[in-house]
Image (cartoon, helix red, strand yellow):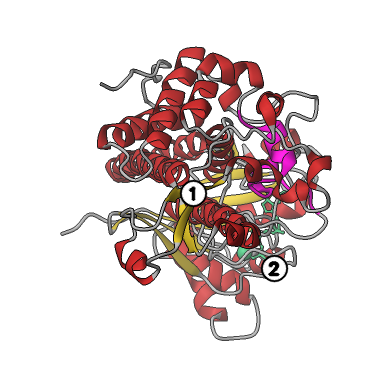
Amino acid sequence: MTPEVPRFAVVGRVNKGKSSIVATLAEDDSVRIDPRPGTTTEVREFPVRVDGRTLFVLVDTPGFEDAPRALAWLRAREVSAAERPARVAELVRAFEGTSELVEECRLLAPILAGASVLYVVDGTHPYRPNYDAEMEILRWTGRPGMALVNRIGAEDHAAEWHRALDQHFKIVRDFDAFSVSFEERVNLLQVFRELRPDWRAAVDEAVAALVAQRGRRRAEAAALVSGLLVDALTHTEELAVEDEAAIEEQRDRLERSFHDALRAREEEARRRVEALYGHREARFEEGPGLERPVYRQDLFAEEAWKLLGLSPAQLVAAGALAGAAIGGAVDAAVGGASIFAGTVLGGALGGGGALYGVGRRYARVRSIGAPGIPGLLLDVQRYWSGARRFRIGPHAQPNFPWVLLDRALLHYDSVVRRTHARRGPIAVETAGAGGGRAGLVAEFARGERRGLESLFRRLRRDPYDPPRWVRDELERAIGRILRRVDPIPGEEPSAEALPHGP
Ligand SMILES: Nc1nc2c(ncn2[C@@H]2O[C@H](COP(=O)(O)OP(=O)(O)OP(=O)(O)O)[C@@H](O)[C@H]2O)c(=O)[nH]1
Ligand SMILES: [Mg+2]
């Protein structure tokens, strides 16, 4: 016989965050959550699965509507403590299918069928004695349970709640559905062990499986982020035109297409990282009126480049400027000063400059061959025979990989922190408003920056055939960085240094 899967029924008064807790624990953004009371009207099970195996089940339920009345019914007849669970079952049978005590019947059914109770209250609203009826009914079911004090608003009444809940529940914990970390979720699961000794082994297995899954996701995210860097740093585009004068007419279109390709590649990596963590409904888009977190701004927006990446001095220390020189792409028109400034010369570009600027100067259009010299796109070349070929890219701005990496890290950080209870866009204060850089790369150890820079340089040098070892080394390096962004409970702290490849 397969062992019984632990079931936890999340119950409480309407609109206290029951569904939010289910969504967060089950990592499921399909759970219906709404500011209006009475959103959940049916019992619904949300299995927590890893590798196709169900570890435990969370049961979302409608909220208590008229607990005092249900309790009065239960008490209408004298019963011994031992008979109380049967009396609750009697209540459900008596009212099921009628138009009375509808919610109570629905929410009690899974508990009577064997689920443990997670009783949810909102610790930001005052405790009132009229909650006692709910707790009393739950006690009558005889099911072991715990209470969770959620935080919906801004006030703090947690202490009085704890005093009240302690009298009804063996275990009472604070649990903010919106902002708990992975570690806090794991800690809560550990507490579930105490609810029923016969579920301990199953809960231990669930914890181990979730921790292992978290590690696998992080490793996959490292592969996605390093894949993005490799592709973006080696991206080139080509076109063939009759003569050099014609290139001027094409220049804008070509640069636009080049930047659009980089933006699209970044967007694709983001979607895949979000999907990895079960955030399938692009809720990372922000709505009108919200301040965009810096990583959400356009990849080539001036603001993003001011706040992210490395400072000019750090770029020099990491050896990034040597890279620009090797790439042969230091644009004389821009001059050395702007490399150090790291941002666009806004005025010089005019209206569209702020949005389009930084990359524009460095992703230069260059001629890559006279007619007849074998190009790389052989089919196209035959078609265009006799024409001159031009190439744009790879993007040679020294800070480009650093800005891109910073954006990927900030995005990753917000994905791994975001609980599945959150709906809609979130406003993120722009860090670095105090004048500093908002990203993470500027905080890296010097040796790590140098190590990464040498990999970036290597990639840009071989855009058509980036060596395998460079890609592997980069993935490992990103893996070490993500370990710091998303530490997993029970894991050894990661080493800071970045070893060099051959
Ligand atoms: N800020 C904040 N809001 C929360 C939190 N938990 C829930 N909410 C909000 O509270 C409201 C109700 O949340 P639900 O999860 O739908 O509550 P419920 O208890 O399932 O409600 P019903 O199904 O109507 O009984 C929603 O607007 C949530 O966004 C929290 O931890 N923090
Ligand atoms: Mg609900």
Above or below, 453 against 212 in this view is above
* Rendering coords of residue 417 (x, y %): 56, 41
Above or below, 316 against 181 in this view is above
Residue at the image point whose x is 56% and y is 73% from the top: 105
* Rendering coords of residue 473 (x, y %): 32, 30
Residue at the image point whose x is 34% and y is 46% from the top: 464
| N-term-proximal mark, 1 vs 2 | 2
Tell me the amino acid under the disc marked 1.
Answer: Ser
Residue at the image point whose x is 66% and y is 25% from the top: 336
Asked if one can make out residue 279 in the rendered structure from this viewpoint, the answer is yes
In-image side of 182 versus 123 (left or right): left
Report the disc number at residue 26.
none
Q: Is 502 or 175 nearer to us in this picture?
A: 502
Other residues around mark 1 within 10 Å, as few (<14) / some (14–19) / many (≥20): some
| Residue range highlighted in magenta | 290-309
Q: Are marks 1 and 2 in contact (CB under 8 Å)?
A: no
Q: What residue sits right under mark 2 in the picture?
A: 65
Residue lying furthest bottom: 98
Please say whether residue 502 is one of the residues in the magenta stretch.
Answer: no
* Quarter of the displayed picture in which ligand 2 can be seen: bottom right
Quadrant that contains the C terminus: top left
Please say whether residue 296 is one of the residues in the magenta stretch.
Answer: yes
Mark 1 residue element: strand
Mark 2 residue element: loop
Residue at the image point whose x is 28% and y is 59% from the top: 52
Q: Is 132 or 314 nearer to us in this picture?
A: 314
In-image side of 471 versus 151 (left or right): left
Tell me the amino acid under the disc marked 2.
Answer: Glu
Report the disc number at residue 367.
1
Give the foreground label among 1 and 2.
1
* Rendering coords of residue 441 (x, y %): 56, 26
